[in-house]
Amino acid sequence: SPAQKLVFNRVNGKRPPLLLQQISAPEECYTLAHEENVRFVYEAWQQVEQQLDGSRSEESACGPVQYVEKTPNPGLKNFVPIDLEEWWAQQFLAKIENCS
């Protein structure tokens, strides 16, 4: 059975004072160049996804090719991806235990 995940709920629905200070911080300002770069990457990726979907349905040799490793690395045979939420929860609890 999968391990239970820790869920942190706010007490009485209130945020701790530290979080209120972080939320009231000024928003980041993005330059026109930044927005243009984001738009370019987004649109280019949309084109790749459309071409990839089209090449799958048509079984043609043209268009983008999705990489699939033919001979997997034997060192990664037992690889298990990390659950970052669980890891952060464990780090949080370890800090609490060390402080008390």
Image (cartoon, helix red, strand yellow):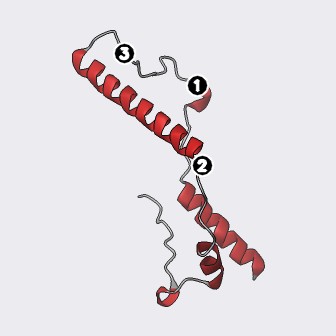
26 left or right, relative to 66: right
Q: Which dot marks residue 10?
A: none
Residue at the image point whose x is 38% and y is 33% from the top: 46
User: In the rendered image, which quarter contains the C terminus?
Assistant: bottom right
Q: Secondary structure at mark 3?
A: loop
Q: Secondary structure at mark 1?
A: helix
Would you name the residue on which mark 2 appears?
Answer: 31
- Sequence-wise first label, 1 or 3: 3
1 left or right, relative to 72: left
- Sequence-wise first label, 2 or 3: 2
* Residue 78 drawn at (x, y percent): 55, 36
Kindly report which numbered mark, 2 or 3, lies closer to the viewer in this rendering: 2
- Between marks 2 and 3, how big is the CA–CA gap? 33 Å
Kindly report which numbered mark, 1 or 3, lies closer to the viewer in this rendering: 3
Q: Amino acid at mark 1?
A: Pro
Q: Amino acid at mark 3?
A: Gly
Residue at the image point whose x is 33% and y is 9% from the top: 61
- Between marks 1 and 3, how big is the CA–CA gap? 31 Å
> From this viewpoint, which residue is outermost toward the front?
32
Question: Within 10 angstroms of label 2, few (less than 14), some, or many (20 or more) residues?
Answer: few
> From this viewpoint, which residue is outermost toward the top?
61
Q: Quadrant of residue 17?
A: bottom right
* Residue 64 drawn at (x, y percent): 40, 18
31 left or right, relative to 41: right
* Residue 25 drawn at (x, y percent): 63, 71
Frontmost residue, 33 versus 3: 33
- Between marks 1 and 2, how big is the CA–CA gap? 45 Å
Would you name the residue on which mark 3 appears?
Answer: 63
Would you name the residue on which mark 1 appears?
Answer: 74
Q: Amino acid at mark 2?
A: Thr
Give above or below for 95 relative to 81.
below
